[in-house]
Amino acid sequence: MDADLARGERERSAKVSREELAEAVAENSPAMLWLGDQFGKCVFLNRAQREFWGIDPQDLSQFDWGSTLHPDDIEKLSAPFAEAMAEQKPFSVEARYRRADGVHRTLRTEARPRFDRNGAFLGMTGVNTDISDQLAAEERTRMLMGELNHRTKNILTVVQALARQTARSSTPEDFNKAFDSRLLGLAACNDLLLRNDWAGVDLADLVASQLGHLGEDAGGRLQSSGPRVRVASHVAQTLGMALHELSTNSLKYGALKLPRGRVTLGWWRSPEGTLTLEWAESGVGPLNPPSRKGFGHSVIVDMVASALDADVEVEFGNDGYRWKVAARSTAGLT
């Protein structure tokens, strides 16, 4: 008899220990755990779930979890919940709930039915997972993929135009060199834009990226200066192409071709905030304008005028070439 009593006491003690352990695990779990009765009323919320809703652990009887649902998600949740309760089967649903601080967060609910030893339905046991940040990240990824697709199409359009126009204005022998040079300029601009998340770039950085290819050819004969100005991504791409054309033309025909030649590139802002840029060459001597306007002229004048909402002037003067851009608004700046 004494042995049976001792064994019974040990079994009761083990049962209590298991129950205490289960309660401690549930209460301290980082996951939001809950128990509902056969009517859908909460009978247990662990600490993580109570903190989410700001609930007094001693006052669950007055708590209505449905009152925290976002109004637009009531119908979304009610149908699968009612079906699962009626058929006593698991369910999963995502809905927005008002957190204790008033912010709505999306919770993914995974629930399973609970039964007693006789098979009577007791309610649901579930876990809520806050997936708001995950959903936001997925949405951002979709937006980025859409933006990448859009930008890729734009770049391919630009490359196609570069190829077509370069072919029109160069011999077959010169095409590869001219096209490769323009592609390198475009690639340098896109590298800079990527480093800045396509949110605009500093004009000084853009100038450095486009004139860096000159290297020793410039020999310190090209000077650039101006205040800190950020230009929008579409403006940066167009200005980058224009600066590349200007520097390439100067190496072939202008100031940078001659030891005595000099180039100054400056920019400034008016009291109204509009941008002015000027590329001025000297030490060349009198110049005559070309007999026809090619792709380079289209980039330097037409495309820049459109991108910056600007007046663009070119002058083949007595001492060299000059290019001046005067924006009429601040639309192209960030």
Image (cartoon, rainbow, N blue to C red):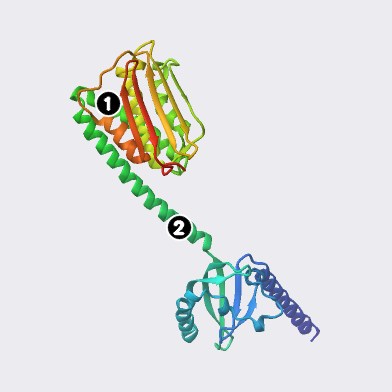
Q: In this view, does 327 lie to the left or right of 290?
A: right
Give the residue at x 78% y 81%. Answer: 6
Q: How far is mark 2 from mark 1, CA to CA?
A: 42 Å
Residue 303 image point, x, y percent: 31, 37
In-front residue for pair 214/1: 214
Residue 52 image point, x, y percent: 62, 69
Among the 4 quarters of the image, the one containing residue 154: top left
> Furthest residue to the top?
259
Residue 39 visible at all: yes
Where 57 falls versus 210 (above or below)? below
Q: Which of marks 2 and 1 is nearer the N terminus?
A: 2
In-front residue for pair 66/79: 66
Q: Which mark is residue 138?
A: 2
The amino acid type, in three-letter code, at marker 2 is Glu
The residue at which mark 1 appears reads as 178
Give the residue at x 52% y 72%. Answer: 109
Where 325 falls versus 88 (above or below)? above
In-front residue for pair 19/136: 136
